[in-house]
Amino acid sequence: MRAISKPALEQIAAFDARVDRAFDRLRGNPASDRLFYGASELGDFSLVWLIIGATRGLRSERDWHAAARVGVGLAIESVLVNGLIKSLFRRTRPPWDHDRKIRLRRPRTSSFPSGHATSAFSAAGLLAEDDVLWPLYYAIAVIVASSRVYVKVHHASDVVVGAAVGIALGRIGRKLVPLPPAPHIVAEPESPA
C-alpha cells in the first residue's frame, strides 16, 4: 500500500479542521446537542437502521425482503469495515479531552473510515430502492454520519470516505440481492351505469 504524500495529508488535515470549526458554531446549542448526540447513539451497532428496516418490513412481503436484506447487509458491512478495513489504517481519533454534556460511548477501533457513515449510507441505499421514503433514509444517513464529527469522535475525512464506502456497498448489495418485483396494481374497469 502506498503512503499518502505529505501535501495530501496536509490538505486532509486542513479540510478536517475547516469542517470542525464549522461544527463549533453549532456545538453547545441544546437542540443541536440532542439531535447529534442522539443520532450518534442510535447509529451505534446500526440500531436506527435495524429499527427502520424492521418497521418497513411490516408493510408487505416485499418490504420484509428489503428489511432482511438490510439486516444481512449491515452484518456484512460491519465485518468488512470494522474487522478488515479499519485494521488496515489505524488512524487516531480526535482527542477525547473536551467536556461532553451528554454521555457517549467511546469507540476503541481506528477512526478511518467512519463505521457510522458506512452503515448509514449502505442501509439508506438498500432501503431506498422503490420506496417513496428514500429522501428520509438519506436525510437520516446524513445526520447520523455528520453526528460523528459533531461529537468529535471522527474527523470529517473519516466520514466522507465512510459515506462513499457505504454508498458503494449499498449499490453492490442491491445488485447482488435484488428485491422481488413490485406487485402491479390493476385498476378495475368501471361498470356501465
Image (spheres, grey):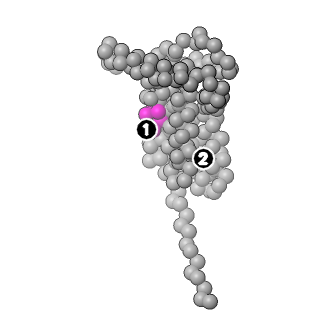
The disc at residue 59 is none
Residue 166 colored in magenta in the image: yes
Residue 169 colored in magenta in the image: no
User: Does residue 171 show up?
Assistant: yes
Which region shows up in magenta?
163-168
Picture quarter with the N terminus: top left
- Residue 191 pos. (x, y %): 60, 85
- Residue at (62, 21) in percent of width and height: 28
Q: Residue furthest top?
A: 97
The amino acid type found where label 1 is placed reads Ala
> Disc 1 marks which residue?
168
- Residue 106 pos. (x, y %): 62, 18
User: Does residue 155 show up?
Assistant: no
- Residue 179 pos. (x, y %): 52, 53
Picture quarter with the C terminus: bottom right
Q: Is residue 37 above or below residue 140?
A: above
- Residue at (64, 17) in percent of width and height: 100
The disc at residue 67 is 2
